[in-house]
Amino acid sequence: MTFTLFPDTRLALARDALAGLSVGDALGSQFFVPGRHPADLAAGRLPAPPWSWTDDTEMACSVVAALGGTGRIDPDALALAFAEHCEPYRGYGPGAVTILRLIRTGTPWPVAAASAFDGQGSCGNGAAMRVAPLGAWYADSIRRAADQARASAEVTHAHPEGIAGAVAVAVAASLAARARLDGDRPEPARLLNAVAGALDPAGEVHRGVRRAAKLLGQSAAAVVDALGNGSRVTAQDTVPFTLWVAATHLGDYPTAIRVCVEAGGDVDTTAAIVGGVVAAYTGIGTPGGVPDGWLAAREPLPDWLPAHT
Ligand code: F2R
Ligand code: MG
């Protein structure tokens, strides 16, 4: 079935995903502060605000601003936006810092991205961490979500696994947003298998997502043992686990974030990815959605993000 998705609806879906991503990022990063324990979250003891967001949110804001401006990803413009808005103290990955510095000083992004990690390109989880709002924007087409996710990833992540991570998350967010519009929550296995179907079957991210589908119903600890929790900061080690969490807890944002916090690893980024996908389905302030109090505790988004986005 095809349907018309008006620009305001796309933007509303992307904004909700950005809210879920940024709250997940900001709350997740609180658990790197010494003395904070995952059990506090389970007991309802939240960190004192404000919760500062990190590179995940900063880059996602550039993606949303690009879509709000032209409705599609222009890689040249996105590369410049990433480079211009980069505040290095936000916890960027080392490869990203170098690539963005090169772009800022005039190196074309294809050259900068290809030079990372001795010419392999980055397979870090950074292209996946920022892309859920883009997937929500393309709620009407997983093919366009995948194509545009690839375009958004390539400017910093030249490694095929880094790109596959972004495609996987964008397709999951597209399906989540579509499910919200349809009022029809997808079965977790259906969601994960649809994501896997959009990926190169020879890749590690693809293999991980297929394994995630087979691990539905297992404990989160068993899934972390099998798939990783982002502690290696790569797409391969991050995306399959996050999509297992999102598929399992698609209707319950607070639980999905708590599972990420309890799993450890790259918590700000696992919570950002999961938060973005889940909020594309739940929205904000709804039953199971991003709690209003959590959104209020998050540091305000950057003032350069245009109001109309
Ligand atoms: N940098 C971090 N986390 C570490 C510090 C967190 C702590 N809270 C703190 O603030 O001190 N987080 C951010 O980095 C991740 C996104 O990374 P991105 O943008 O992909 O960067 P990078 O550097 O390109 O890749 C990350 C790591 O992946 C491994 N890697 C990448 N390509 C590789 C390759 N071809 N071969 C081998 N390894 C590769 C490297 O370990 C990179 O450092 C997010 O978590 C974000 O929040
Ligand atoms: Mg981060």
Image (cartoon, grey):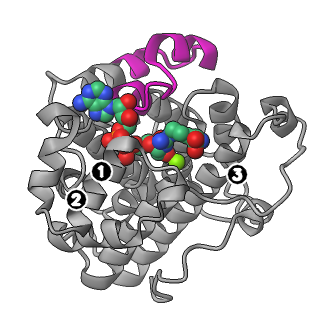
Q: Nearer the viewer, residue 118 or 257?
A: 118
Disc 2 residue type?
Answer: Leu
| Picture quadrant of ligand 1 | top left
Residue stretch rendered in magenta on the structure: 211-240
Find numbered disc 1 in the image and state the secondary structure of the residue it sits on: helix
Given this view, does label 1 or label 3 mark the residue nearer the observer? Answer: 1
Position in image of residue 91 (x %, y %): 52, 50
Q: CA distance from mark 1 to mark 3?
A: 39 Å
Query: Is residue 185 rendered to the left or right of residue 119?
Result: right
Give the label on residue 102, or none: 2
Residue 145 seen from this side: no
Find numbered disc 2 in the image and state the secondary structure of the residue it sits on: helix
Q: Nearer the viewer, residue 75 or 249?
A: 75
Disc 1 residue type?
Answer: Thr
Q: CA distance from mark 1 to mark 2?
A: 6 Å
Residue that numbered label 3 is attached to: 288
Residue that numbered label 1 is attached to: 98
Question: For the point 16% across and 24% down, which residue is it?
Answer: 201
Disc 3 residue type?
Answer: Gly
* For residue 266, above or below residue 126: above
Position in image of residue 60 (x %, y %): 43, 62
* For residue 187, above or below residue 204: below
**CB contact under 8 Å: marks 1 and 3:** no
Find numbered disc 3 in the image and state the secondary structure of the residue it sits on: loop
Question: For the point 86% across and 56% down, which residue is it?
Answer: 48
